[in-house]
């Protein structure tokens, strides 16, 4: 098996770290080598958060260089656009179609760009969805991350049951029902 690379991008507080933990755990359960590297910006203040996940028979480094990512899982559309140079030709972007204004936009020093989803769609195979609405349908807006994991799961060759078992083993019991429903809504999105 060749090495696969997935980049998870978002802003602090969106649950990217739980998403990367679920992804890493499901890969480990499949008996594959996995390397994960988390890069935190000003994550407590809504800054960029990036997680690199590489897996296969043997992985030497978690770092994903430009043009290497098979999939970019983006929790916010501007973060997806920023990560676009990392996507390989023929790669896929899964993006939550929500805008979270970064500090320069909040302070008036910059404007949030228009047409981001259209730019992504013109550049790559793009799945754009309102993951927040699906998370609300599942029972909690905090389940956006697991909705997106559900969409991602459908783009991998890892069986659905393995994802469900990993979620059950990773998510605390009191949040399990909401997260399982969120996963199902994401998995059946396309």
Image: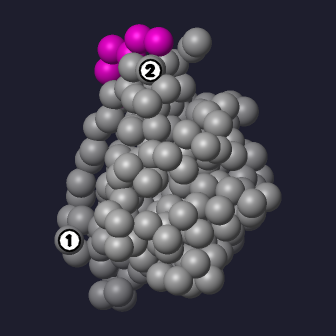
Image check: 140 left or right of 16?
A: right
Viewer-side residue, 182 vs 60: 182
* Residue annotated with mark 2: 31
- In the picture shown, does residue 177 fall above or below 56? below
Viewer-side residue, 170 vs 15: 170
- In the picture shown, does residue 181 fall above or below 141? above
Label 2's element? loop
Question: Does label 1 or label 2 sit earlier along the sequence?
Answer: 2
* Residue annotated with mark 1: 44
Q: Residue at x 63, y 76 (%)?
A: 134
Q: Nearer the viewer, mark 1 or mark 2?
A: 2
Q: In x, y percent, where is residue 98?
A: 56, 76
Q: Quadrant of residue 102?
A: bottom left
| Label 2 environment density (alpha carbons within 10 Å; few <14, some 14–19, many ≥20) | few
In which quadrant will I find the C terminus? bottom right
Q: In x, y percent, where is residue 70?
A: 59, 33
Start and end of the magenta stretch? 57-62
Total labels: the figure holds 2
What is the C-alpha distance between the residues marked 1 and 2? 34 Å
Q: In x, y percent, where is residue 139?
A: 53, 83
Image check: 41 left or right of 99?
A: left
In which quadrant will I find the N terminus? top right
Q: In x, y percent, where is residue 99?
A: 52, 77
| Label 1 environment density (alpha carbons within 10 Å; few <14, some 14–19, many ≥20) | few
Q: Residue at x 61, y 43 (%)?
A: 161
- In the picture shown, does residue 28 fall above or below 87? above
Q: Residue at x 41, y 61 (%)?
A: 10
Is residue 178 visible in the rendered image? The answer is yes
């Amino acid at each position: 098996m060749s090495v696969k690379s997935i980049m998870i991008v978002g802003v602090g507080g969106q649950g990217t770290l739980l998403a990367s933990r679920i992804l890493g755990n499901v890969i480990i359960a499949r008996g594959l080598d996995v390397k994960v590297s988390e890069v935190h910006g000003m994550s407590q203040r809504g800054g960029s958060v990036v997680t690199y996940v590489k897996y296969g028979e043997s992985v030497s480094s978690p770092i994903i260089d430009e043009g290497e990512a098979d999939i970019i899982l983006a929790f916010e559309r501007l973060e997806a656009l920023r990560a676009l140079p990392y996507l390989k030709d023929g790669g896929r972007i899964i993006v939550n179609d929500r805008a979270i204004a970064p500090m320069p936009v909040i302070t008036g020093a910059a404007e949030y760009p228009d047409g981001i989803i259209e730019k992504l769609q013109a550049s790559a195979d793009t799945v754009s969805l309102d993951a927040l609405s699906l998370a609300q349908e599942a029972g909690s807006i905090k389940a956006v991350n697991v909705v997106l994991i559900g969409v991602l799961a459908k783009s991998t060759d890892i069986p659905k049951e393995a994802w469900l078992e990993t979620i059950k083993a990773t998510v605390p019991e009191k949040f399990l029902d909401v997260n399982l429903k969120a996963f199902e809504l994401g998995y059946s999105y396309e």
